[in-house]
């Protein structure tokens, strides 16, 4: 690239950093917090995760669920999480407004206590990291945009490091030159790991994440198997004759009755549905080991969904990507209808399955956490050095931005931007906006001259 293009990249690098640094610091710090959410929660929620109720009577899991529903009026159980020892069983309870709470049952299935789902450490960290705890489409796009421009910063920083003099040996370097060299050196070292961390987090993003997920659904051969997208139905012959022709309730209809245990999925003796205890026996009979989650059927034709996942976001529930599976059990007979395992996934779905736990820092245990922590801390250090370098050359009363590019755009510069824009569509859209703004400023200045 020409000298003018070097200056242009430097200028864009500078302004991009200036605008997204606050977001990047927030995302990196919340990401570090999320890296250790299992360790924090095991300590902070020790009584709920591992404690025992004062009641020592052994009851069934269905009786424990019934007590939970009686205790928390207006809430219904939508999911049962069966964890391996020494973890207690966890119920996800939801009300009609979508509010959730987690209720814990000890080894005797007696209630220990509950949590407001919004206020758990993992969910707070996740909300800050993905939507700045504000939520909404605009904020989600803003977070994704910051991640995309961070990749731009890393690539342009890499180019300027090797094209410029950042790593060249200088006799008696000034403090600013030392900071600049260290900024360039550390940035170069973490470029590839940081790009991997960012790209493995994009499946969650609002724009690109939705695009990737849609592609995975549309093309099962490379993405998500059709069976996982369209779960089977239970055998309707198992429904009692008297209620067989009844219209299956919609989600909203069934939710409206969940305060009454007689209408709870798995609890209605008249419906012929399997109880949770019976289902667990069927699950064990199918050689499915703990941990796993049980999702209730939403309708009379629905099935029990029993799954093991590598990226649940629940302490104690994650498994190896190779062990990930989704199984469907008939809600009346308890027969295993079908199973989708990791081996059935396409390339894209397998990338999700490995990439997300790698991003979260639990794919290969503590080494994964420590590597991610090192990369994140180094990234914060690079940001700090960049700000320090700018402040050290900033003249009093002036903005001290990089020099303007004098030459036209080269093919190399255009190709670089187009490729990044195609790989990251939201970045591409923002790029068009930047070009339009620069064009307007150019014509305004031209008119003044």
Image (tube, rainbow, N blue to C red):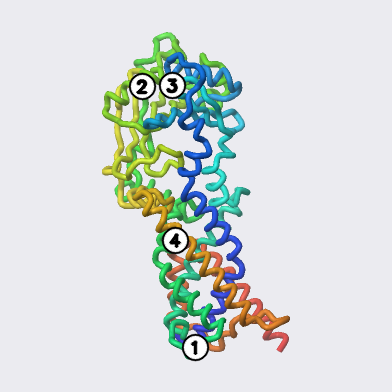
Nearest to the observer: residue 42 or residue 401: 42
Query: Residue 47: percent from the left, percent from the top?
Result: 51, 31
Above or below: residue 401 compared with residue 112: below
Q: Which residue is mark 1?
A: 3
The answer to whether residue 400 is left or right of residue 111 is right
Considering the numbered disc 4 on the image, is that residue within a helix, a strand or a loop? helix
Tell me the crowding category of disc 3: few under 14, some 14 to 19, or many 20 or more residues within 10 angstroms, Cα based: many
**What separation in Å lies between label 1 and label 3 (alpha carbons)?**
69 Å
What residue sits right under mark 4 in the picture?
374
Drawn side of residue 248 relative to residue 23, left or right? left
Q: What is the crowding at mark 1: few (fewer than 14 residues within 10 Å), some, or many (at least 20)? A: few
Q: Sort mark 4 into few (<14), some (14-19) or many (20+) by Cα contacts within 10 Å.
A: some
Q: Earlier in the sequence, mark 2 or mark 4?
A: 2
Residue picked out by circle 2: 279
Q: Nearer the viewer, mark 2 or mark 4?
A: 4
Q: Is residue 141 visible?
A: yes
Query: Which residue is at a point 56% across and 81% down the rendered structure image?
Result: 176
For marks 4 and 1 on the same chain, the one whose residue lies earlier in the sequence = 1
Residue, disc 3: 300
Q: Secondary structure at mark 2?
A: helix
- Residues at marks 4 and 3, CA–CA distance in whole angstroms: 50 Å
- Do tag 2 and tag 3 residues touch (Cβ < 8 Å)? no
Give residue 341's quadrant in the image. Answer: top left
Q: CA distance from mark 4 to mark 1?
A: 34 Å
Q: Which is in the foreground here, disc 2 or disc 3?
A: 2
Residue shown at 46%/44% (left/top)?
39
Front-most of residues 338 and 67: 67
């Amino acid at each position: 690239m020409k000298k003018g293009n070097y200056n242009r990249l430097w200028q864009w690098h500078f302004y991009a950093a200036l605008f997204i640094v606050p977001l990047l610091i927030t995302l990196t710090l919340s990401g570090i917090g999320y890296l250790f959410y299992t360790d924090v929660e095991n300590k902070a929620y020790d009584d709920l995760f591992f404690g025992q109720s004062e009641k020592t009577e052994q009851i069934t899991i269905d009786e424990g669920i019934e007590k939970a529903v009686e205790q928390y009026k207006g809430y219904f159980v939508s999911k049962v999480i069966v964890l391996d020892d020494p973890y207690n069983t966890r119920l996800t309870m939801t009300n009609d407004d979508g509010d959730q709470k987690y209720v814990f049952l000890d080894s005797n299935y007696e209630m220990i206590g509950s949590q407001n789902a919004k206020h758990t450490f993992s969910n707070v960290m996740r909300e800050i990291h993905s939507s700045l705890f504000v939520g909404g489409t605009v904020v989600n796009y803003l977070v994704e945009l910051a991640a995309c421009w961070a990749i731009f910063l890393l690539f342009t920083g890499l180019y300027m490091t090797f094209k410029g003099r950042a790593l060249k040996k200088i006799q008696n370097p000034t403090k600013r030159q030392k900071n600049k060299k260290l900024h360039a050196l550390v940035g170069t070292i973490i470029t590839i790991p940081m790009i991997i961390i960012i790209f493995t987090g994009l499946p969650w993003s609002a724009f690109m994440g939705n695009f990737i997920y849609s592609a995975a659904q549309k093309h099962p051969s490379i993405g998500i198997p059709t069976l996982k997208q369209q779960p089977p139905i239970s055998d309707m012959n198992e429904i009692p004759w008297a209620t067989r022709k009844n219209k299956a309730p919609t989600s909203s209809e069934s939710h409206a009755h969940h305060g009454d245990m007689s209408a709870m999925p798995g609890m209605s003796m008249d419906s012929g549905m399997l109880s949770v205890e019976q289902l667990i026996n069927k699950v064990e009979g199918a050689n499915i080991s703990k941990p796993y989650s049980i999702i209730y059927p939403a309708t009379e034709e629905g099935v029990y969904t029993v799954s093991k996942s590598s990226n649940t976001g629940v302490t104690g529930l994650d498994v190896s990507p190779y062990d990930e599976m989704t199984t469907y059990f008939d809600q009346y007979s308890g027969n295993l209808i079908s199973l989708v395992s990791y081996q059935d996934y396409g390339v894209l779905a397998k990338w999700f399955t490995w990439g997300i736990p790698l991003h979260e820092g639990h794919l290969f245990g503590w080494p994964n956490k420590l590597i991610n922590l090192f990369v994140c801390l180094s990234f914060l250090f690079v940001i700090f050095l960049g700000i320090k370098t700018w402040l050290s050359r900033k003249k009093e009363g002036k903005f001290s931005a990089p020099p303007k590019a004098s030459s036209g755009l080269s093919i190399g510069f255009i190709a670089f931007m187009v490729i990044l824009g195609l790989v990251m569509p939201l970045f591409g859209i923002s790029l068009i906006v930047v070009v339009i703004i620069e064009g307007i400023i150019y014509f305004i200045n031209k008119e003044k001259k």
